[in-house]
Amino acid sequence: MVLSHLRFFGENPFNYDLNDLDLDHFCLYIQRELHEITAHCASEPEGYIDTAWNQPFAPTDRRTADEMIDDLDHLYHGPETDQMTRKV
């Protein structure tokens, strides 16, 4: 019985048996995703940081990044934020 348990825990899940992980499928999926990501040119940060499309906490918070920066009364701004804005 001990040998059967050791075999169960010592089994290699990366073979081509019926109960093994389908690594070929996983790798193909990752390859397709990488092709999709790299098929488009990366845009310049200035092109999207200050736009209405930049909603860092969407879908729960639809404010833009600029609106969040201007909202100094919110909890995610600490005391150091107020000091930084007054120096400017």
Image (cartoon, rainbow, N blue to C red):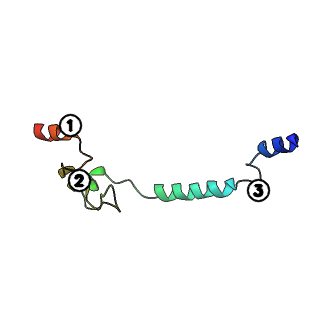
| The quarter of the displayed image where residue 81 is located | top left
Circle 1 residue: 80
Could you tell me residue 63's position as x and y percent? 26, 59
The three-letter code of the residue at mark 2 reads Met
Q: Closer to the N terminus: mark 2 or mark 1?
A: 2
Could you tell me residue 61's position as x and y percent? 30, 60
CA distance for labels 2 and 1: 16 Å
Label 1 CA crowd tier, 10 Å (few <14, some 14–19, many 20+): few
Q: In which quadrant will I find the N terminus?
A: top right
| 56 sits left or right of 78 in the view | right
| The quarter of the displayed image where residue 4 is located | top right
Could you tell me residue 8's position as x and y percent? 80, 46
Q: Nearer the viewer, residue 53 or 45?
A: 53
| 9 sits left or right of 85 in the view | right
The three-letter code of the residue at mark 3 reads Asn
Q: In which quadrant will I find the C terminus?
A: top left
Circle 3 residue: 19
CA distance for labels 1 and 3: 55 Å
The residue lying at 86 percent from left, 40 percent from top is: 2
Circle 2 residue: 68
Q: Closer to the N terminus: mark 3 or mark 2?
A: 3
Q: Closer to the N terminus: mark 1 or mark 3?
A: 3
In the figure, 73 relative to 79: above or below?
below
Q: Mark 1 or mark 3: which is in front?
A: 1
CA distance for labels 3 and 2: 50 Å
In the figure, 20 relative to 6: above or below?
below
In terms of secondary structure, where does tag 3 sit? loop
Label number found at residue 6:
none
| The quarter of the displayed image where residue 59 is located | bottom left
In the figure, 81 relative to 60: above or below?
above
